[in-house]
Image: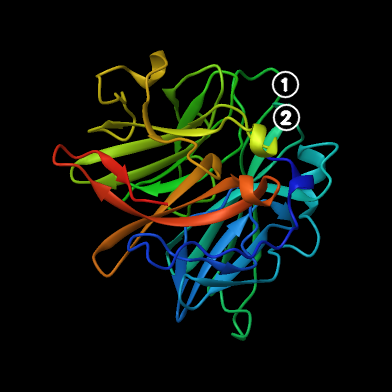
Amino acid sequence: MVLALLLGAVVVHPAPATNPIALPLRGQISIHDPSTVVRCQDRYWIFGTGQGVSSKYSTDRVNWLAGPPVFARPPAWVTNAVPGFRGSFWAPDLLFFNGQYHLYYAVSTWGSKVSAIGLATNPTLDPENPEFRWTDRGMVIRSVATNDFNTIDPAPLRDAAGNLWLSFGSYWSGIKLVQLNPAGSRRLSPDAPIYSLASHPSIEAPYLYRHGGYYYLFVNWGSCCQGTNSTYNIRVGRSTRVTGPYFDRDQANLLDGGGSLFLGAMGRFIGPGHIGIFSENGSDWFSYHFYDADHDGAPTLNLRRLDWSADGWPVAGSP
């Protein structure tokens, strides 16, 4: 979940250049709920919560500039699905397949289960390309007041067999997973099962990643959107099947409140959340936001190396 009023500040504060496994980010890197970093030609792109879905780009993953929003105005279906929506789309994530960038985003209002996940596609992320155009593909899945889940924080995944999945969820009964059709635009069928993956009194922001024969489920515990009072932390479990069950390092089931700590607060890096993983030149990296204690708790982007332990668990590099 996110609070749009936290967005908008430009934060410029490089990390120490001597750190060998952190990127000294510079530029317009204020962001909340960052998507997975993706590359299009010679630019890296990341999307985040904001009016019309915010975007930022970089040619080196160090210097970042503001890009155009995805939507100049909300798609027509949005306000019908979620009354009270005011234009700030939440927690986007994207995946490239079928020759298109598929961007999933959440539409909701604070504290409500009346929510929806939508899809927009684009053949390129380069605004200068004549083919650049975001096309609204409509609503993928929704939740209403009588559901025991909330359709926000979408994260797409292609499994080992090439099937498309979408994880989502926030609070209520926890994190869910549904299989999508080959176009990625709807559930595989109207009655396709919704799988439960993880539960906790304060859980959201799922992210699934396939590595070395396992599916890793990252989630956030705690509260966001309160600056340096935020208690967000990132937890992880893994499974040999995308539908679970997921267990942490101590073999606790994530459906029973399990989840090994992957990343918590450290120094000025308060409330880390909303992880995304990408690979480049044989190295894995992860993106996330944190509330910067050195800058009045501004929500800020960070990129760090992702390492793997001898027994196959993800390990966060130094900040």
Figure quadrant of residue 231: top right
**SS for dot 2:** loop
Q: Residues within 10 Å of mark 1 (few under 14, many from 20)?
A: few
**SS for dot 1:** loop
Q: Please state if 291 lies on the left or on the right of 175 as rendered.
A: right
Residue with the mark numbered 2:
114
In the rendered image, residue 175, in percent from the top left (x then y), is placed at: 49, 28
Q: Which mark is residue 145?
A: 1
Callout 2–callout 1 Cβ contact below 8 Å: yes
In the rendered image, residue 257, in percent from the top left (x then y), is placed at: 42, 16
- The amino acid type, in three-letter code, at marker 1 is Ala
Give the residue furthest to the left: 310
Whether residue 21 is situated above or below residue 185 in the rendered picture: below
Spatial CA distance of label 2 from label 1 is 6 Å
Q: Residues within 10 Å of mark 2 (few under 14, many from 20)?
A: many
Q: Please state if 72 lies on the left or on the right of 277 as rendered.
A: right
Q: Please state if 283 lies on the left or on the right of 154 as rendered.
A: left
**For the point 19% across and 42% down, which residue is it?**
309
**For the point 59% across and 63% down, which residue is it?**
13
- The amino acid type, in three-letter code, at marker 2 is Val
In the rendered image, residue 148, in percent from the top left (x then y), is placed at: 60, 18
Q: Which mark is residue 2?
A: none
Q: Could you tell me which quadrant the N terminus lies in?
A: top right
Q: Is residue 32 visible?
A: no
Figure quadrant of residue 48: bottom right
Whether residue 17 is situated above or below residue 104 in the rendered picture: below
Q: Earlier in the sequence, mark 2 or mark 1?
A: 2
In the rendered image, residue 239, in percent from the top left (x then y), is placed at: 26, 31
**For the point 73% across and 27% down, which residue is it?**
111
